[in-house]
Image: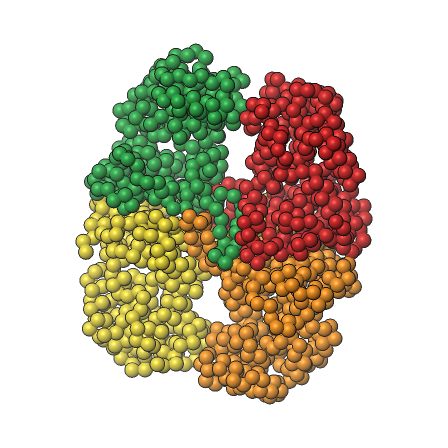
Chain colours: A green, B yellow, C orange, D red
Amino acid sequence: MPARLNVALVGAGLMGSFHAETLAHRLPHARLATIVDADEAKARELIERLELDDTRYESDPAAAFTDPAIQAVVIATPARFHAELIVGAAQGSKPVFCEKPLSHTLAEADRAIEAVAVAGTFLQIGFQRRFDRGFQRARRAVDDGTIGPVHLLRSITRDPAVPRPEGPLPWAIFLETMIHDFDVLRWLANSEPVEVSAMGASIGWGDDPASGLLDTAVCMVRFANGALGTADVSFNGAFGYDVRAEVFGPGGMAAVGDGRDDSAMLYTAAGVTRAHSAWFKQMFGEAYTRELEHFVECARTGSTPAVTGIDGRQSLRMALAAIESSRAGQSTPLPS
Amino acid sequence: MPARLNVALVGAGLMGSFHAETLAHRLPHARLATIVDADEAKARELIERLELDDTRYESDPAAAFTDPAIQAVVIATPARFHAELIVGAAQGSKPVFCEKPLSHTLAEADRAIEAVAVAGTFLQIGFQRRFDRGFQRARRAVDDGTIGPVHLLRSITRDPAVPRPEGPLPWAIFLETMIHDFDVLRWLANSEPVEVSAMGASIGWGDDPASGLLDTAVCMVRFANGALGTADVSFNGAFGYDVRAEVFGPGGMAAVGDGRDDSAMLYTAAGVTRAHSAWFKQMFGEAYTRELEHFVECARTGSTPAVTGIDGRQSLRMALAAIESSRAGQSTPLPS
Amino acid sequence: MPARLNVALVGAGLMGSFHAETLAHRLPHARLATIVDADEAKARELIERLELDDTRYESDPAAAFTDPAIQAVVIATPARFHAELIVGAAQGSKPVFCEKPLSHTLAEADRAIEAVAVAGTFLQIGFQRRFDRGFQRARRAVDDGTIGPVHLLRSITRDPAVPRPEGPLPWAIFLETMIHDFDVLRWLANSEPVEVSAMGASIGWGDDPASGLLDTAVCMVRFANGALGTADVSFNGAFGYDVRAEVFGPGGMAAVGDGRDDSAMLYTAAGVTRAHSAWFKQMFGEAYTRELEHFVECARTGSTPAVTGIDGRQSLRMALAAIESSRAGQSTPLPS
Amino acid sequence: MPARLNVALVGAGLMGSFHAETLAHRLPHARLATIVDADEAKARELIERLELDDTRYESDPAAAFTDPAIQAVVIATPARFHAELIVGAAQGSKPVFCEKPLSHTLAEADRAIEAVAVAGTFLQIGFQRRFDRGFQRARRAVDDGTIGPVHLLRSITRDPAVPRPEGPLPWAIFLETMIHDFDVLRWLANSEPVEVSAMGASIGWGDDPASGLLDTAVCMVRFANGALGTADVSFNGAFGYDVRAEVFGPGGMAAVGDGRDDSAMLYTAAGVTRAHSAWFKQMFGEAYTRELEHFVECARTGSTPAVTGIDGRQSLRMALAAIESSRAGQSTPLPS
């Protein structure tokens, strides 16, 4: 078992930079050996900012995938590259951590999962909410019988408002964002989805909803065990990052996600006020560390991670069904 | 303007008894003049329990509707009698307060609304959540522009678990319970619904969902102003009565309904615990008083109440659309 | 047992008016028969505002005390009149409810208590916090053994800031305000005080502290059972009325008093905000009703109230000891 | 500026082990070069557990203090060794971080502060609460004028109950524990104490209070700016670690320390429950990291830390005054 696992990171963007920091400075058992990014300047700037004296830069991921010194790969590129990179890393027999979503098509998802299986390695998907201590307490309340059979679920994501991006990805609200909620619902329901129904809107952006350029969406999901869940997503959050979940059954309910930023309360003539988490690093900083710690430990010990490619594929199916439902105005079955 | 309005109450059951107490003892401007109920023993027991020395009993509502001393009527019978009673009271020119739902069919709703219009009196529907101070603060945050254009809404109702009733009303989950949520969504959206989609289940009861004997339901609603809302209902609450709502827009969010029963927190080895409201009198006691106070003031002053028969009819339309949607597996348009 | 107890209210000021409303309109078993106040206009204005058609006005309390139709007396005058009025009411054999503090001197307190004992009637002191449901839950946690032997206590009162009154009562911060906290500490400790130590200041007002014109004070109390408590008071509250208490022991802690005004939370760019109770009617409206309800029931049934003249006297002793301590800079023993 | 500061840690006990982990694995700019402890087995076990391949063990602190490769010293021994070790480290010209309390006597405190001044290095005291984000928000509310002139303060510490230690340090409740609260009060008051009054008890332990073996204590402090503060401490916490503070002025109040362990709430028939922080690593893990990060940055850049030996000395003065006051039954002046 290596004292420090040599990890190659592919992608030095927003998430990649954050993972780089975790791999380099927060995980005693990891070493950020290589950073791969087509944009050399960006990668080198990251290496410098994090003071990574012995981290190499590579422009070509294949260099990392074939490097025998590299023991694991973390992928944090745009989703359209995920499948190809997973296949490459798997062919190099590397354990792979890949950011969500696994891919935008089932064909790609299947190709990636297949390659990993053939190579006999493993694939972990970056559903970090599962590693948040609050979310984990909610899941424990399901596992230990406190909730009883799950009847109702809820998961929400409201991203802080940013100007509408240039050339946004159609249906990103389902494929990139609500995919988190689909994973949470499925994980807390402890069951597979059988039916999805969704509505979308472009209220703030004012795009034609048929274009898939939505900033607001709601969804209902029926699970095989009978549970019903709802999800909603907005890209117009005014008060920070709002991520919550609920799981309800005949024994009670667990609710998670208060957005509390610290323990201070301010009492003034305006009322009693607390701060709210602004964005994902603030809210899930610890969870992101814990998911990579889990990945590193799985890679070092050869165990299977708690969130696999199958989880990535199932949440993708739910997202694709939600797109279809919101287009067709009817619920979409998810045959098993 | 009469110092005390003479009110006749029709129905001495669960809600009727509670309204009786409010009319008799909590409203300085009301006098509970008459109680009407086919079950004389029940009515007389209520009169005795509340020590109502000068309250009359009548078995026939017509006696109250035609009594010139009666200045207003409060109806708290099962919903199937509502329309007929409203028509009767209206023909006697009495202002009418009627418990929700207005009725179970649009035909009955229209007949009641028409009769009230013809008589030139008014009809208030018992959507008491609108009179809760927390819900009112949420609505003010819409009205004063804090929220901005409404993007997302949520309303939930989870009743405390009781044994499945004998011979339950089919689709009661939408017609009798989620009707509250429909009213809240519509009131907070400040817009009319254009599309409803629902899913129902009978998880705890184990009935055939096609029978309409559901104990669990979720719903999505699209409003004319673009807002999307969700609702969920359960009849299997373990921790009391759970009623909440949220309204979210680009300016922020108002969330209401913490179920807090008093201001005490208990810190023990089991964690930090507070009590949760057990049932509706506990949670909405003040709101029930305020809605009847509003009704009495409207009747005394001749003004129009804040919740009218139209509100009752619109929430009924949403409930009927939800039933249709949950049967058909597709969303139901609500043409204006 | 009379259906409605005929009550005479002495004092039509701030508290008196509020008690008048409760007696007249919120208690089915009470009738506000007489209002006594030297200021006839004020009393008649109150009678009119509350639409009290059959309430008499008297300028002389003796008229009420000797009126055989009066069955109980509620005193809400300035404290310097309390003892004399209690003696008068007792001599008329009336059960007496008297606002806190019982008096400003032990001699007066003893005279009042003695007169009540001689008359064989009873005296209830207006420590309404004991009737708040949250405070009662805290006390139950002591009574049922959850807390265990009490080790630490806290009680605080911060009044909303008002301009410094003209000619304020010296030491009012202890005699009129912290007297509430002394009662709460003693009630939650379930033990008698043996030592008091206090510090006072006039920070906002800028008076000479030796004058007793304090706007800020803190206090420590040791109880016979070993428990230690603190209290603090300010007259410069910016965010409303802040009243809280804690009781801590080896089994855990109960904390009470969140100042929550309703169940709404507002999420905006400024954070997450809730409203805070502005003043005493808002925070303790229900408790004030419940204490008078308790008084009326005791008077109707001949039972002894939960808060008696002895409680009034003990909190006065603590206040007097706190004054002495804050003058002398040393703790003041309270011999039993 | 060294990329990684070589730090020697003196003391491998409870706090020392935790600081070791932080220095070794959480601070990119620190290297835990040496661990000093008289107990070699304990130190080596720590080195092994943390997988510190290039950390040396020394039995004699002088070896570290005179080692030119060592660039800073962290002291986490029992307090009676602090002064001597600080003097030694200062004579080696090392910046020193020392756990609270600085010492148990003013003479030792002065000797340590003097030695550091003579050596031209610096001394940081381990008052980690100042580095907690909630506490910092409270202090910002003082600094930015939100609170206004400080009128009232509160700080509390309740340690989780453990069996009474064998041969406990007399007056430890003030010298070792309430010293945290004294620092917090002084820091939030932004003023120096002028008068202290305290009461102590041994309720759970049952020791003679005169022995100083107290498990419960309360204290009042008057500050030069007029503010009054209270503190309380217990060693009998049933629900975890309870650390809170409040600062109140005419502009409002900041309250900090909710003990919230994660964002999950569990709703069951028993009420609504959340978990409470069990102990100091859980509650202040991030603050401990941030105080050492601050120390390392000060040592790397030559700047003065935010918490110095003077802060350690002032809180010690308050503790000593509290001991004297609790013995004498009168308040103790703290002449400037």
- Residue C60, given in percent of the width and then of the height, sits at 60, 87
- Residue C67, given in percent of the width and then of the height, sits at 59, 88
Direction from residue D262 to residue A123 in the image, left or right = left
Direction from residue A332 to residue D317 in the image, left or right = right
Picture residue at 36% right of the left edge, 30% below the top = A100
Picture residue at 32% right of the left edge, 82% below the top = B69
- Residue C86, given in percent of the width and then of the height, sits at 65, 79
Quadrant location of residue D288?
top right
Quadrant location of residue C335?
bottom right
Decide if residue C244 is in sight here.
yes
Quadrant location of residue A122?
top left
Picture mark count? 0
Decide if residue D14 is in sight here.
no
- Residue B163, given in percent of the width and then of the height, sits at 39, 53
Query: From the viewer's perspective, is residue B61 above or below residue D85?
Result: below
Picture residue at 55% right of the left edge, 79% below the top = C12
Quarter of the figure with the C terminus of chain A: top left
Picture residue at 22% right of the left edge, 75% below the top = B119
Direction from residue C8 to residue C123 in the image, left or right = right
Query: From the viewer's perspective, is residue B52 above or below residue A294?
Result: below
